[in-house]
Amino acid sequence: MLSFPTIVKISRFTIIFIALCILFLSCSDLNVRDDDSLNKFRASITLKETSKDVSVELAKIGVIEVKVENESDELFYELVFNNEIKYYEKLHYLKNVIFVLKEDFLTVKNDERVKLRLKNEKILVETPSLTGIIDDINFEKLDNESSKNLKILLLMLNEIRLDNSKRVNPTMIQKSLKVGPCENFHLVYSVNYTRELAENEVANAFMAVYKADGNCYIPCQTTTGIETSCLGDNHLCISTRGYCCDSASATSCY
């Protein structure tokens, strides 16, 4: 017969063991790759072939086509931009980016540090430093490269799951981007986590003052106001603004 101290020790061990199991299961729950989640994610994808119709958000930043290639059950996506539009290169994050949908996640080709999955109908974010549901992610804790990739992945996830009836021909929208006579028109867009962050980026583009001949100049002038649209629960906003860079304008020297 076991002594009372021995029974107590066994009971303590059992409690600790159960507690550790519960903790392990709770921590690993976000990383479960069940067939149901995989099937639901794949079933939610509406963009499986190359399309010249795009979301309004992509049309406003100059996208004229989404190219889609299917290789070994993996889908590769690339955005094609209007070659008549010039861009503010510092914010042109979507240029030459290829996205890949493989297994049950979306990521950037040749850089899988950031992945998006669906878990219980919510977006699950995986990065080298953080993993969690999108609502719980502290974006400020992400390194610059992970943060940039997460922004464009969220935009692309919306695109490939968009109801096909909401896609538009981008031609008419892009004709309205350029306002007034301007030979050197540039479009500035920002993809960011909040309306304020996105609008601040496009508002400050081309506004760096430079000095020449003892005077100060701004290289471009705005031709449009700032337009912003936000997706889903406002975890992502896209702002645009047009600039004309035909000639610099004088400004005060600071």
Image (cartoon, rainbow, N blue to C red):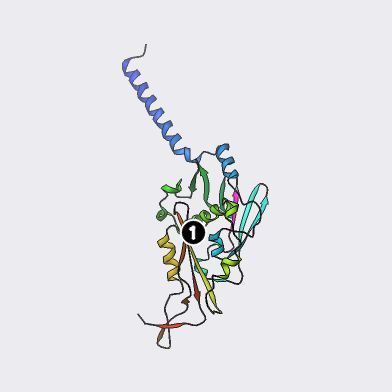
Residue at image point 54% right, 64% down: 60
Residue at image point 39% right, 30% down: 19
Q: Which residue is farthest left? A: 5
- Give the tally of numbered discs: 1
Which residue is identified by label 1? 148
Query: Residue 206 or 109: which is nearer the viewer?
Result: 206
Q: What kind of residue is marked 1?
A: Lys
Q: Is residue 26 left or right of residue 6?
A: right
Q: Is residue 58 above or below residue 104?
A: below
- Classify residue 68 by image quadrant: bottom right
User: Alpha-carbon neighbours of circle 1 within 10 Å: few (<14), some, or many (≥20)?
Assistant: some
In the rendered structure, which segment of residues is drawn in magenta? 95-101
Residue 18, image x, y percentages: 41, 28
- Classify residue 15 by image quadrant: top left
Q: Which residue is farthest top? A: 1
Residue 153: within the magenta?
no
